[in-house]
Amino acid sequence: MRRFRFERWCRRAVARRHHRLPGDGERGGNPVELAVTLPAILLMLFASIQVAAVFVARSTALNAAQSGVNAQRLHEAAPNAGAERATKFLNQAGDWLVGWKDPGPSCVTTATDVTCTVTGRALSVVPGVSFSVRQSAHGTVERWTAP
């Protein structure tokens, strides 16, 4: 009796193994799907990192320009105080903004206003891709006026 039960169990197991489930003919499909989708996933990953690097570079340039304006707008500030402050800020900020030294930060001062501009390129994560960055800040000059 036991042998009969065991044989019947074996026949059922073999029958279950040979019974094809729907989609069972696509064995090995997962590695192919991964090979097709992985480049797209990597492209989106690097693109998102590059977008983040551009935003950090823009923020760095804007903060440097604002720092330059704050230094240049002081009452009787030296003529080059804003550009020097922006340069000092960029030297300490790291390499998110590259190529800013070629023209360097520039500050234009009139009798009432100061405008500082910082230009450069964002750090490139993807080789061969370059994003230019130009940020300006504006402020009023501190001065004595008649009451």
Image (spheres, rainbow, N blue to C red):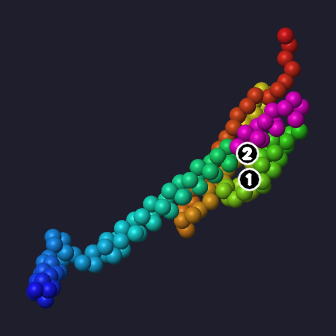
Q: Quadrant of residue 70?
A: top right
Q: Residue at x 54, y 58 (%)?
A: 50
**On the rendered image, what quadrant is the N terminus found in?**
bottom left
User: What residue would you read off at disc 1?
Assistant: 93
Residue 77's mark? none
Name the residue rendered at 80%, 28% in the picture: 141
Q: Is residue 127 above or below residue 108?
A: below
The span from disc 2 to disc 1 (Cα, nearest Å) is 9 Å
Could you say which quadrant of the image residue 29 lies in? bottom left
Q: Are marks 2 and 1 in contact (CB under 8 Å)?
A: yes
Check disc 2 and give the amino acid type: Ala
- Front residue (pair 81, 103): 81
Q: Find disc 2 in the rendering and name its residue.
A: 64
Can residue 64 be found in the magenta stretch?
yes
Specify start and end residues of the magenta stretch as a single range.
63-77
In magenta segment, residue 23: no
Q: Is residue 34 left or right of residue 114?
A: left
